[in-house]
Image (cartoon, rainbow, N blue to C red):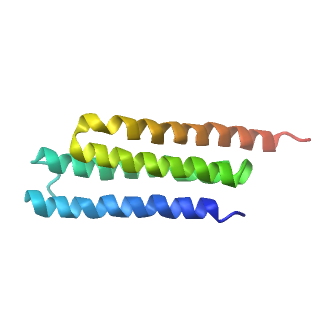
Amino acid sequence: MSPWPALVSLLALLLYFVVTINVGRARAKYGIPAPQMSGNPDFERVIRVQQNMLEQLIFFLPALWIFCLYLNPVWGSGLGLLWVVGRALYAWGYYQAAEKRGPGFAIASLSSLVLLLAGFAGVVLALIPT
């Protein structure tokens, strides 16, 4: 198996770690003690980035690996890297203003959808006897 999907998975997890650290930094900056989850709109955007990324990782990682196992690890890794870039753009935009999260969301969502649908097709094709 190619090491590329593993590298992309680690990059995705590293990005998640960074956005999680940003939540702690935002708690200190905006004076939001744990377990409080609201109070300042700037803090709420930072925590929403982290929560949304966690939600998306559950979808992304299996789709990435299934695509890579049943179709092509290089192409899957390329799509996965696009997802990581999209999520970074999403975070950067959302940190500035909620209205700026759209382009990153679109990039990440489209790459996830391609991974899912193509991975599904790859599994179905593998089930058909030749």
Q: In this view, does 35 lie above or below 53?
A: below
Residue shown at the point (61%, 59%) measured from the top left? 5
Q: Is residue 115 above or below residue 2?
A: above
Q: Is residue 59 above or below residue 32?
A: above
Q: In this view, does 17 lie to the left or right of 79?
A: left
Q: Which of 37 and 2 is in front in this view?
A: 2
Tally the numbered discs: 0
Q: Is residue 34 visible?
A: no
User: What quarter of the picture does the N terminus occupy?
Assistant: bottom right
Q: Is residue 65 visible?
A: yes
Q: In this view, does 26 lie to the left or right of 108?
A: left
Residue shown at the point (14%, 55%) measured from the top left? 36
Q: Nearer the viewer, residue 56 or 97?
A: 97
Q: Position of residue 15 (x, y in %)?
A: 40, 59
Residue shown at the point (39%, 36%) measured from the top left? 103
Q: Position of residue 34 (x, y in %)?
A: 15, 62
Q: Where is residue 92 in the image (x, y as percent from the top left)?
A: 30, 48
Q: In this view, does 28 lie above or below 97?
A: below
Q: Is residue 82 left or right of residue 27?
A: right
Q: Position of residue 67 (x, y in %)?
A: 66, 48
User: What quarter of the picture does the C terminus occupy?
Assistant: top right
Residue that sits furthest to the right in the current view: 130
